Amino acid sequence: MSEFLTERRARIAAALHLDDAILLVGAGDPVPLPEGSDQTYPFRSHAEYFYLAGHECAGGLVAFDPRDGAGTGWVSFVPEVTEGERVWEGRTQTPGTPLATLAPWLASRANRPIAILGAPWREVNADAALTATVRAALTHARRPKDGHEVTLVRRATVATAAGFATLREHLRPGVTERMLQIELEAEFFRHGGTRPGYGTIVGSGPNAAVLHFEPSGRAVRAGEFVLVDAGAEIDRYMADVTRTYAVGAPDAFQRDLFQVVLAAEERAIAKCVPGAEWKEIHLACAVDLVAGLVAMGVMRGSAESLVEQEAHTLFFPHGLGHMVGLGVRDGSGLQPGRAKDARPSLRTLRMDLPLAVGYVVTVEPGLYFIPALLNDPARRARFHDCVNWPLAERYFALGGVRIEDNVLVTTGAPEILTAAIPKTW
Ligand code: GLY
Ligand code: MN
Ligand code: MN
């Protein structure tokens, strides 16, 4: 077994404090498409399984008995590859212990509490409370990325940078969102990408204001923003990057909006140091964004007071970012022992924790003109005095700007893993 996996398992065993409990972590099974086409939805082993098994294996199960030792108590049970799988998919046998021996392994450990992580393992009854506790502990222990993981994220950022560089060459009036997606993703694959980490977002003009827009056949027009949010995945590890380009000649308002987001992003990145509270970085960034909108004449009042009133959510409706790596949200969530902050404006924050060395986070502020929010009568009434509404209405078709980088928290200055992808145009 590879050295990194041995070390990882020993570290996780120490962090979980299982005492007498047994841990099972399921990979999950492929889900067939409903119409009987002999195909399945793309399969990915559950991230918790992949992390502890070190490989993809449909139907696999990692088991751990702490009584057998932190280093030696791990068993990787794998199903026997079938003839059909060999014939139709070219699959080979995943190395491990035959799954048929799981039953006696469990029988010899009867009457012990069991936590089941990963995908559900239905043949065995889990202790639900124990499972919740162990899952929270595993998520937290996974947050600092080990060297093997950081190497994979770096490789994903290299392929991602290549994709964005090629996409830029194709940016011109008349190109469609779909054409840009094709150029970007092809370059990911050419640079070792195994797939896009998540659904690529390419939104031109008003579509740039749709946070998770799926590229369409719409042709880009001169003077529009094009927002591209995408990341290559390599061996399950991915980047998550956003750039917003202006095609042709942007006007002064677009330039100002872009500069506000860019400055806010850079200030937020500089704050990504060990011990910094993510929620505080988010709120400080919201103040920066609102101060920019006030300077542009779009919002009215003091930036701090507007953020306290939650008026920033009109133009910045999402959180500042999340963890990324083994999945596009990876180990995001709450610091152990914390409850979700009940403030409505923090509902969309994907994590509430202090940063620590080894965390890889996205920093992704954005400002958007989203008609669904800005035309909402309740918001119009509540924030009547906070916004220069006639000015805002002039830009309802403008879309928006988001800039997103991936940042490694270190003992020193934050390292921007995606620094090779130019932000300006
Ligand atoms: N790619 C989606 C996000 O930025 O979280
Ligand atoms: Mn993104
Ligand atoms: Mn993101």
Image: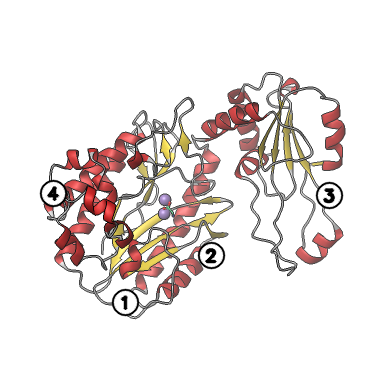
**Residue 283 x/y as whole percent:** 28, 39
Circles 3 and 4: CB atoms closer than 8 Å = no
- Give 187 or 227, whichever is nearer the viewer: 227
First in sequence: mark 1 vs mark 3? 3
Q: Quadrant of residue 335?
A: top left
SS at mark 3 in the image: loop
Query: Is 247 placed above or below 336 here?
Result: below
Q: Residues within 10 Å of mark 4 (few under 14, many from 20)?
A: some
Q: Residue 300 — which label?
A: 4
> Along the polypeptide, which appears first: circle 3 or circle 4?
3
Q: Which mark is residue 189?
A: 2
Q: What's under tag 4, amino acid-wise?
A: Arg
Disc number placed over residue 80 in the picture, else none: 3
Q: CA distance from mark 1 to mark 3?
A: 52 Å
The CA span between labels 2 and 3 is 31 Å
- Give the CA separation, mark 3 to mark 4: 66 Å
Work out whether 22 lies above or below 3: above
Q: Earlier in the sequence, mark 1 or mark 4?
A: 1
Helix, strand or loop under label 4: loop
Q: Which residue is mark 1?
A: 172
Which quadrant does the C terminus fall into?
bottom left
Amino acid found under the numbered disc labelled 2: Phe
Q: Pointers 1 and 4 in contact (CB under 8 A)?
A: no
Q: What residue appears at the point 31 percent right and 49 percent down from the top-left corner?
A: 365
Q: Position of residue 226 (x, y in %)?
A: 33, 67
- How many residues crowd around disc 1 within 10 Å: few (fewer than 14), some, or many (20 or more)? some
Task: Please name which of the two marks, 2 or 3, marks the residue nearer to the observer.
Answer: 3
Quick one: label 3, few (<14), some, or many (20+) residues within 10 Å?
A: some
